[in-house]
Image (cartoon, rainbow, N blue to C red):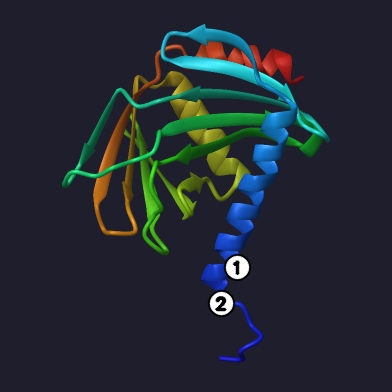
């Protein structure tokens, strides 16, 4: 390998951590405003430098692991950023770095989806998949998120979808 080239894995990590630093800067300058609490989901908004950001977020009701594992806080998020033409971006922060090249298995009731990973986050890879996931979440009752840590530990997080539709309606209005 040419010594001046950065391996793909390192480039992905650099890009991920750069985005976290940018988000941290945004978070310091614009505190999120709570739009409401809707059963197991909350809706928030804040102003980024180039767009209004609206998002719904929840934490799992239950987390299971193949063995005892220490994890940072765990979240599932759906985000709108109209200034960037982003609507319904689904993501999860899993609380540990994912195994390299791992995918996340997302199950909403009986509908199954796959998310790609980077660092401790996972996202849908197409707008169409995001739309299908959000539609399934709105009509669903329970969501499972299954991932594998960089140490090989498998985890399953169980989310309630109670209140998601109302929370989504609030960000739909706030981020027209």
72 sits left or right of 22 in the view: left
- Tell me the quarter of the picture where residue 166 sits: top right
The quadrant of the image that shows the C terminus is top right
- Tell me the quarter of the picture where residue 150 sits: bottom left
5 sits left or right of 154 in the view: right
Q: Between residues 112 and 52, which one lies in front from this camera angle?
A: 52
Disc 1 to disc 2: CB gap under 8 Å:
yes
108 sits left or right of 30 in the view: left
Which residue sits furthest bottom?
2
Q: Is residue 81 visible?
A: no
Q: Between residues 118 and 17, which one lies in front from this camera angle?
A: 17
Q: Is residue 133 visible?
A: yes
Looking at the image, which residue is at 42% across and 64% down? 101
Question: Which residue in the structure is indicated by mark 2?
Answer: 7
Which residue sits furthest left?
67
Mark 1 and mark 2: span between their CA atoms? 6 Å
């Amino acid at each position: 390998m040419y010594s001046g080239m950065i391996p793909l894995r390192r480039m992905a990590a650099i890009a991920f951590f750069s985005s976290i630093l940018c988000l941290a800067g945004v978070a310091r300058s614009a505190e999120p405003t709570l739009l409401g609490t809707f059963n197991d989901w909350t809706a928030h908004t804040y102003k980024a430098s180039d767009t209004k950001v609206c998002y719904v977020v929840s934490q799992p009701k239950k987390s299971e692991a193949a063995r005892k594992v220490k994890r940072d806080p765990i979240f599932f998020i759906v985000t709108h950023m109209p200034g960037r033409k982003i609507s319904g971006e689904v993501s999860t922060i899993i609380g540990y770095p994912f195994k390299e090249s791992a995918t996340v298995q997302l199950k909403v009731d009986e509908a199954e989806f796959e998310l790609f990973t980077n660092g401790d986050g996972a996202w849908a890879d197409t707008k169409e998949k995001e739309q299908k996931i959000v539609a399934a979440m709105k009509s669903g009752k329970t969501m499972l998120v299954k991932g594998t840590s960089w140490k090989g530990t498998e985890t399953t997080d169980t989310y309630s979808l109670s209140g998601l539709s109302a929370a989504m309606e609030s960000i739909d209005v706030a981020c027209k």
